[in-house]
Amino acid sequence: MFDLIVIGGGPAGLAAAISAYENGLKNILIIERDKELGGILNQCIHNGFGLHYFKEELTGPEYAGKFIEMLGKTNINVMTDTMVLEVTRNKEIHCVNTKDGYCILKAKSIILAMGCRERTRGAISIPGTRPAGILTAGAAQRYVNIEWHMVGKKVVILPVIYGLLWQEE
């Protein structure tokens, strides 16, 4: 039984786990579905992070690295490459990974820090059944900055505000 399980190893999850540890909880687990901690910060290679918290300008990976370094000075447990399948009313977390297989973990408290998702092509009403080359900004950023794939040489950005296409008059 864990005192706290944090689902999500991005900036919010890391900060929550570290803060809980600094405030007295010692039996903490972070569950992250990606292969490494850091969340969306890992693909944000531009500057602008860390000004408020660390008082210095950092890239996303540098900012995540600072939290991961802080995490390394604790005894907080981490499960990466782990998919959470269910969270029950009894505070049981059903998850799976290739190392441990299917697990049921029990916690006194749970923090959900899974970030957000961009809306899909269908959700923003881009027509057609096979719109080749249409990517969300986050998907394009991941392909270019993490996976090193060229997504195209000519780019059109279609801003969508509250489900409506934005138009200048």
Image (cartoon, grey):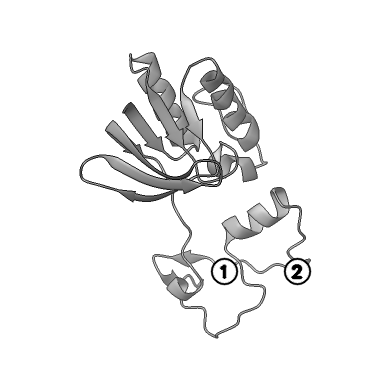
Q: Residues within 10 Å of mark 2 (few under 14, many from 20)?
A: few
Q: Is residue 122 above or below residue 105?
A: below
Q: Is residue 100 above or below residue 130?
A: above
Marks 1/2: CA–CA distance: 13 Å
Q: Secondary structure at mark 2?
A: loop
In the rendering, at what x and y percent does residue 48 appear? Answer: 60, 35
Q: Which quadrant holds residue 41?
A: top right
Q: Which residue is mark 1?
A: 158
Looking at the picture, which amino acid does disc 2 mark? Lys
Q: Indicate the quadrant containing the N terminus: top left, top right, bottom left or bottom right.
A: top left
Task: Indicate left or right for 105 with 134 as reference.
Answer: left
Q: Are marks 1 and 2 in contact (CB under 8 Å)?
A: no
Residue under the point 44% across and 33% down = 30
In the rendering, at what x and y percent does residue 99 appear? Answer: 55, 41
Q: Which residue is mark 2?
A: 154
Task: Indicate left or right for 158 with 120 as reference.
Answer: right
Q: Residue furthest bottom?
A: 128
